[in-house]
Image (spheres, rainbow, N blue to C red):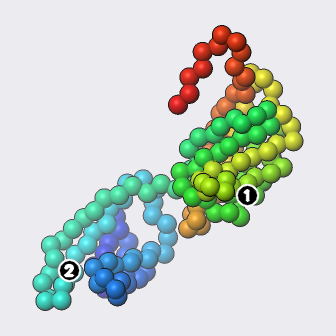
Amino acid sequence: DIYNYTLNSSVYPESAVINPETRSVVFLNFTDNFPEGENSLQIENIEDNCNNIMQAYTGNFVYELIYPVSIDIVSENQLRVRFSENVDITTAQDQMNYSVNEGIGNPTVAIINNSDSTVVGLLFDNGFSLEQSYTLSVSNVQDINQNVMTQADIDFVYYLPMPFDVVFTE
């Protein structure tokens, strides 16, 4: 019964289907994405096979849309973007979803890393200028569940270490 489950005290799932194999897992399907940030799911009036009703339960969770976690500067015209989760191939490889300011523009190539589908490599026709500040704007990339990210801007500086520079990496 969908009315045994309530999201944020007001939203019921579209469906609640018990896993026939385990009979201990229920799949809830909601019409809309969860609101970003903290959410709560209330569960009540659930009966076991002996008609015992479980005590009401509220579970809290945080929902975040996909977002770029970091960028690596690979060369004077290449960036590597790491996302918070696995990306959808079509949207992640769409060059129009990425842009660098200061006249660099969109990449000519955007390709998902073969061994890590949270990483997308970007290749630009125009090179970055040494010690210049840039902003990479990323939008419309989806995760593998087709949840669309909100636009994110990531600042970076193209810099080549020189002799006697001290370089810190995280």
Q: Is residue 47 left or right of residue 137?
A: left
Q: Is residue 3 left or right of residue 86?
A: left
Q: Is residue 155 above or below residue 113?
A: above
* Residue at the image point whose x is 71% and y is 64% from the top: 90
> In x, y percent, where is residue 30?
45, 74
* Residue at the image point whose x is 58% and y is 65% from the top: 144
Can you tell which of label 2 and label 1 is closer to the viewer? 1
Q: Quadrant of residue 66?
A: bottom right
The disc at residue 1 is none
Q: Quadrant of the N terminus?
A: bottom left
The answer to whether one can see residue 145 in this image is: yes
Q: How many dots with numbers? A: 2
Q: In terms of depth relative to the viewer, which is nearer, 80 or 114?
A: 114
Q: Is residue 2 left or right of residue 145?
A: left
Task: Report, in whole angstroms, how far the alpha carbon at label 2 lies from the one at label 1.
Answer: 46 Å
Q: Is residue 99 above or below residue 14?
A: above
The answer to whether one can see residue 3 in this image is: no
Residue lying at the far right of the rendered structure: 125
Q: In terms of depth relative to the viewer, which is nearer, 96 or 5?
A: 96
Q: Is residue 11 above or below residue 23?
A: above
* Residue at the image point whose x is 84% and y is 34% from the top: 127
* Residue at the image point whose x is 60% and y is 20% from the top: 167
Q: Quadrant of residue 149?
A: bottom right
The residue carrying pointer 1 sits among few (fewer than 14), some (14 to 19) or many (20 or more) residues within 10 Å by Cα, namely some
> In x, y percent, where is residue 29?
44, 77
Q: Is residue 103 left or right of residue 160?
A: right
Q: Secondary structure at mark 2?
A: loop
The residue indicated by pointer 2 is 45
Q: Amino acid at mark 1?
A: Gln
Q: In terms of depth relative to the viewer, which is nearer, 112 or 61?
A: 112
The residue indicated by pointer 1 is 93
Q: Amino acid at mark 2?
A: Asn
